Amino acid sequence: MTTPASFSEEECLNVYWKIKNFSFCREKIESPEYSISGNRYWLSLCIGSDYVDCELRTSTSNWPINLNREISFLTCDCSPEESISGGNYVYLRVPKDAIFGKRRNSFLPEDTLTVRFRSPTGSERGKVVICSQIGVERKYFLWKYLSNYQYCLEKSVQDSQCYGDIKLTLKSTGGFNTDEQLFIEISRKGGERCYYILKVSVLDVDGKSHNEVSDEFVLEKTDGVQTKVFPAFFKKSKLLACKNLLLPNDTLSLKCNFAISLGSLADQTSVVSYCEDVESLVKVSDDLSMTVKEKTDCCSAAELQTDLKSILKDGTLFDETLQIGTEVIKVHKTILSARSPVFRAMFTKDMKEAINSTVVIEDLDLETVRRLLLYMYTDTIRDYQWENVKKLYFAADKYEILSLKRRCVSFLKTNLSVSNVSEILVLADLHQDGELKSAALDFISEYDSAVFTSEEWQELEKNNSSLAVQVMREIYCSKRLRLD
């Protein structure tokens, strides 16, 4: 459900509510309070069996008649893809599958949901970040198992009054040398109602993970013993066939990530900021225990960004120019050199760019260069849109700005779709980007039927048949490995 608002961001108070560890949310939660025109408000969110509901609440009995409102769930590029606006009462209801389904990575980057509330005001304008965090206990451990042992191996992962006594037991269903799969049995005695996620993968001799399996369970409150079975994650025949790789010194090594939660709020805080860039704003208070000094440092960083943006815009004390077609942008060698080793080489060696004080750029358009410079001067990205980020990725790779490239890769990975994954595959192959190519391969492997019948894939087969064949071969081998 998306109902566009009739007011602009500049005339509003914009409240961004970040909810960390959102996957573990299991009860109704409320945001910290904030003020609009002297009245106190807060957001209320509830996850039901089929929907995620969010509404505005207030302590005042007299709602302002002329108060327009909008509530949105933002994706990782800050787009309000699920949104509703209206008058006195605004209630956003979104199907759970829209948040937790195929677009989970877009709505929950780093497992954090961002809710935006905005309303036109006459005085309080700007951006406010309020943060909540679902309490989660996490344990990361390496679980080693000697393959010649014939008995079950047990591991205690939790023992507390609220969570109970939780043990993992590694089992095989017919003796280690049969063609059966290994599995994990999870047992708990006592404890409150809780929710947990377990991820397990097999480590090879070089420490690389294989066949990661993840599952999640709800454990009800009980004084007795509950047992769950974690999905089988590897055939023993495959382990023995790859013994040198997966069983060095006859030892099986499992990388385990165990997280458990009661589903309730653990901590929350609020931070007021007036940063221009929304993407950096919603990251400003990731640490919920941020001190007053650290909050002051964030404000100082925002002021520095504003000052640096100003000298870029005005060209104050410039000593170099970038020429893009007929357009010329005044820049500063020191800043460009600090941010890019490519620019540093241009300006410190006897190259024509240093001699002529002009860098001619022929393979980037003007707007992409402006966005690139904005990042180099202020560490912010403007207009997070697919085409813009693709062009920025190319620029970041060309000038070796690794931090920008990482942010572009993160955006592209979390916004993959059937219609664009072929394009990203070509981009990753062209730039020899293993991380981006691996993400594209994983996506194609998961949605192979839809991808291989798409028009975009047919174009790839026609224009880059060798890459298409390589991808299909890798996916076939990967799936064969899992089946074997």
Image (cartoon, rainbow, N blue to C red):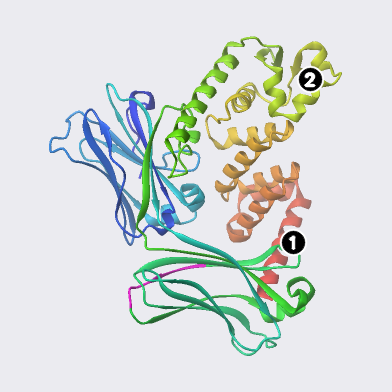
Mark 1 neighbour class, 10 Å CA radius: few under 14, some 14 to 19, many 20 or more:
few
Question: Taking 331 as reference, is 444 above or below it?
Answer: below
Image quadrant holding the N terminus, namely: top left
Residue 324, visible in the rendered structure:
no
Mark 2 neighbour class, 10 Å CA radius: few under 14, some 14 to 19, many 20 or more:
many
Q: CA distance from mark 1 to mark 2?
A: 45 Å
- Across and down, in percent, residue 399 comes to 73, 30
Res 68 → quadrant: top left
The numbered mark at residue 473 is 1
Front-lying residue, 341 or 93: 341
Q: Which residue is mark 2?
A: 347
The residue sitting at 52% across, 30% down in the picture is 383
- Across and down, in percent, residue 90 comes to 25, 41
* Residue type, numbered disc 2: Phe
* Residue type, numbered disc 1: Arg
Question: Taking 223 as reference, is 384 above or below it?
Answer: above
Instruction: Point out the stretch of residues depicted in magenta.
Output: 215-222
**Secondary structure of residue under mark 1:** helix
Taking the view exactly as shown, the residue that stands out farthest to the left is 61
Res 398 → quadrant: top right
